[in-house]
Image: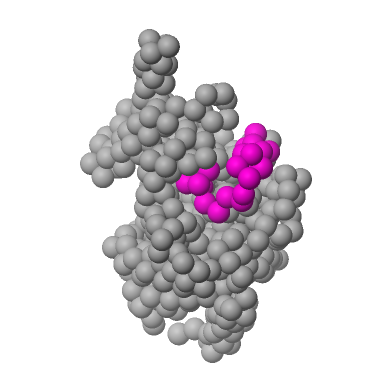
Amino acid sequence: MPHWIDILIFIIYFLAMLAVGFYFANKHTDERDYYTGSGKLSASHVGLSVVATDVGGGFSIGLGGVGFTMGLSGSWLLFTGLIGAWLSAVFLIPRVFDWQQKRGRHFLTLPQVFGYLYDKKVALVAAVICIIGYTGFTSSQFLAGAKLSTAAFPAIDSQTMLWIMGAIAVFYTMLGGMKAVIYTDTVQWIILLGGLMLVAIPMSYYKLGGMQGILPYLSEDMLSLKNISWQQIVNWSVTIIPIWFVGMTLYQRIFACKDVKTAKKAWYFAGVLEWPLMAFTGVILGMMAKVAIEQNLVAVPGGTLNDVELGLPLLIKNILPIGLTGVVMAAYLSAVLSTADSCLMAASGNIVGDLIPKSKKKTQKSIIRLSKLSTLLLGILAILLASTMQNVLSLMLYAYAFMVSGLLVPVVAALVLKKPYPLAALVSMLIGGGVSIGLIIAKTKLPYGLDANVFGLTAALLSFTLTALCCEKLLNKTN
């Protein structure tokens, strides 16, 4: 049984998150204030929120599992996050502000950007893709939180913990909007990085006997940065780098910045926090979990660890002393909540901003009520979805793959082409997203061990190119 001090830390932490939501509950002036904080947030707050959202609980737990199986080479997973952040800072952010200025009013959602660049049909399809993708992504975060909590507090079953975690995230997000999300993200990320680097790693290192106790249990491959296949590099790259160009949660944070300079500074800051800081922190803890189990310092329920993502929670539970266990577990749960709240805001923004007709949004108060209701309903749906899944990283990467395959090609086309091709964008979104999700659902064995997203993106690019060429020929014949 967990000690009452650890339980108390958990309770205080959760109450604090809810308090932030209640604080901002009645402070929203309009729809823009609810979804983007009126575009007045600082680079430091936005940067911490960006990395908290992108890494979150899924990658935190997933990194532990990758470190457990691959060792230091697992850190390349988040190196793709650094590349994506910096590429989008250089190429995407200036164009987004330029498009916004030419449009004459602020964007609130990514589909509104698609509507400006192409047409309403493209915007509608983009909204549906975002809603589906971010509902799945939210589910992965709730599942990560349930795994962590159940490993630390085995008296509570995973389904019960899933609903507890989900309810807390849904309610403070629903009440507080983007301001609550970003300010809680800032605190949560500081707690996470501080708890892992300053508490979990030093304490685990000491308990495992320092380098002399750790190294005998790790192979050369585990200590190498080359223990990775080219297929894994390709799969991670095509899934994670593009999300920086199509992630609704990231666009909302661009819209939350007052200018290009602020947004770029936030993105550069976020990239460094992802790699090397969080990348090596996560995989090192995963490696320490492996060593702890092999040293028999950590008892594995049933004697066999069937899910490597549980290694890290078990390490925290068994190695850390009373009080510090609660701090570090709260740190991991903060990562879960920081991503879950952002994904809920993204999907809710798509429903209210892109799907609900303007005639239904009569006043700003009614819009905010609709926003809170959609956040609540999506949160419940995400919890139900999480209750049917087992693997955090797989669920998260499936959601990533669906959004990337459906949305990346039209965004890149808008960045490099002078002429818009709405039909080409629409066809590529449907075919790209459809191919990825179809291959995933069918569990098709793909050549060379490549991810479904590789084939979805290829299909999206080919369909966009062919459709654009056909449109151009028809236009030339007409003229």
* Any part of residue 232 in sight: no
Instruction: Decide: is 467 above or below 68.
Output: above
* Any part of residue 153 in sight: yes
Residue 125 falls in which quadrant of the image?
top left
Q: Residue at x 27, y 40 (%)?
A: 438
Q: Of 153 and 114, which appears nearest the observer?
A: 114
Q: Residue at x 41, y 67 (%)?
A: 374
Tally the marks. Answer: 0
Q: Residue at x 67, y 50 (%)?
A: 270
Instruction: Decide: is 263 above or below 80.
Output: below
Dominant secondary structure (helix, strand or loop) of the stretch shown in magenta:
helix
Percent x, y of residue 80: 57, 40
Residue 460 falls in which quadrant of the image?
top left
Instruction: Say which quadrant the C terminus sits in.
Output: top left
Q: Magenta stretch: residue 102 in it?
A: yes
Q: Magenta stretch: residue 253 in it?
A: no
Q: Of 389 and 414, which appears nearest the observer?
A: 414
- Horizontally, residue 204 falls left or right of residue 152, namely right
- Horizontally, residue 355 falls left or right of residue 338, namely left
Percent x, y of residue 331: 59, 69
Instruction: Say which quadrant the N terminus sits in.
Output: bottom left
Q: Of 321 and 355, which appears nearest the observer?
A: 355
Percent x, y of residue 114: 49, 40
Q: Residue at x 37, y 49 (%)?
A: 128
Percent x, y of residue 45: 70, 61
Q: Which residues are magenta?
A: 91-113
- Horizontally, residue 206 falls left or right of residue 460, namely right
Q: How is the image coloured?
A: one colour
Q: Pick out the residue farthest to the left.
A: 442
Instruction: Decide: is 245 above or below 274.
Output: above
